[in-house]
Amino acid sequence: MTLKFRVYLFELILWIFLPAAGGWAVFKVFPAYAFSAYPVIPAGMIVLGTVFYFILKKIPAISDSKRILLFYFNIVIKMILSLALILFVVLHDRTNALFFVITYFVFYIFLMIFEIRCFNKVTGFLSKKKN
């Protein structure tokens, strides 16, 4: 495991752990909102984020015009996998479906912010000055 991958994985786990700890605290304060599928969310986000690293590693070797397309393709694939996971959990436990979906999308937003930040760090896409 390379140092870059370890740093990326540490940042990813940190970005997922902080909302997970916050969600756990909310569920302790408001036990009526707790649901059994909660551990699926951070675990799923870490797996999805780890898959993104291998795509992120290839980005510097790709031309500028195809970088953003690869990034969008990654987002679409993750969205499809996320919807499949949501559908599976919601069909399995319909009583807490709303709380699961809301919590999942909060985590999904955090993951997207993290990935956009990593994409920008690797490519400098947002920091390039236009002439």
Image (cartoon, helix red, strand yellow):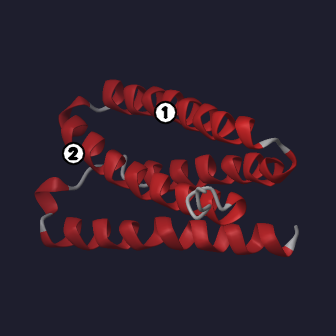
60 shown above or below 129: above
Residue 46 in which image quadrant: bottom right
Q: SS at mark 2?
A: helix
The residue located at (12%, 65%) in the rendering is 30
31 shown above or below 64: below
16 shown above or below 104: below
Residue 76 can be seen, yes or no: yes
The foreground one among 57 and 88 is 57
**Mark closer to the chain start, 2 or 1:** 1
| Residue that carries the numbered disc 1 in the rendered image | 79
Mark 2, other Cα within 10 Å: few <14 / some 14–19 / many ≥20: few
Instruction: Give coordinates of residue 31: x percent, y percent.
Output: 15, 62
Tell me the amino acid under the disc marked 2: Phe
Residue contact between numbered discs 2 and 1, judged by CB atoms under 8 Å? no
The residue located at (41%, 49%) in the rendering is 108
Q: SS at mark 1?
A: helix
Tell me the amino acid under the disc marked 1: Met
Instruction: Give coordinates of residue 93: x percent, y percent.
Output: 29, 32
| Residue that carries the numbered disc 2 in the rendered image | 99
Q: Is residue 36 left or right of residue 4?
A: left
